[in-house]
Image (cartoon, rainbow, N blue to C red):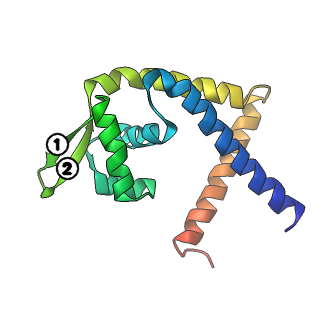
Amino acid sequence: MNDLDRKLGTLFSDIARFRRILFDQLATEYDLTHVQVFVLNHLHKEDGLTQTELSTRMDIGTVTVSGLVDRLEAKGYVERRPDAKDRRAKQVWLTPKMQEVWKKIGDSMRHMNSVTFEGVDEAEVEQLITVLRKARRNLQDRLNGAAS
């Protein structure tokens, strides 16, 4: 393993871990974890997904998604409704309570980003985003078989 391999792997891992920890601290006010917010974020983008669709999009097991939805439902943030296209499936919908909390979660995300990029100039952040999007696309293409 060369120095670049070690630096990149450690940096990506540390940044993701530290952001998860900080976000969990910020989200305690709403009694949520970063994984639960990940579910809510998918629903915020497209409300009414089935648990199977959530599982696929999040790349985690359906049993795990079911447990996450159970906890979110118990907190009043989501509700399950029958799927009109498949009697066996349930769609997951955000509740009005979640809509109210969503703005506060956004505030927490902005705070986390301001902590993350404190002392970093806006142009540098934009350049980082551009580079990371390219890296993500390269990895997605490779995983989808587009590159060899």
Q: Quadrant of the C terminus?
A: bottom right
**Secondary structure of residue under mark 1:** strand
Query: For the residue carrying disc 1, how many other residues have a C-alpha within 10 Å: few (<14), some (14-19), or many (20+)?
Result: few
116, above or below 104, in the image = below
- In the picture provided, is 83 more to the left or to the right than 47? left
> Residue 12: image x %, image y %?
71, 50
Q: To which quarter of the image does residue 47 belong?
A: top left
Residue 19 point in image, percent of width and height: 64, 37
Number of marks: 2
The picture places residue 89, in percent across and down from the top left corner, at 18, 55
Q: Nearer the viewer, residue 45 or 101?
A: 101
* Residue 17 as seen in the image, left or right of residue 53: right
How far, Cα to Cα, is label 2 from label 1? 5 Å
* Depicted 57 relative to depicted 120: above or below: below
Q: Which mark is drawn over residue 90?
A: 2
Q: Is residue 137 above or below residue 90?
A: below
Say which residue appears at 32% left-offset and 55% top-offset: 53
Q: Is residue 139 above or below residue 118?
A: below
In the picture of the structure, the residue carrying the numbered disc 1 is 81
Amino acid found under the numbered disc labelled 2? Lys
Quadrant in which the N terminus is drawn: bottom right
Please tell me which residue is depicted at 34% across the width and 56% down the height of the picture: 63
Q: Is residue 93 left or right of residue 28?
A: left
- Residue type at tag 1: Arg
Q: Nearer the viewer, residue 111 or 71?
A: 71
Q: Residues within 10 Å of mark 2 (few under 14, many from 20)?
A: some
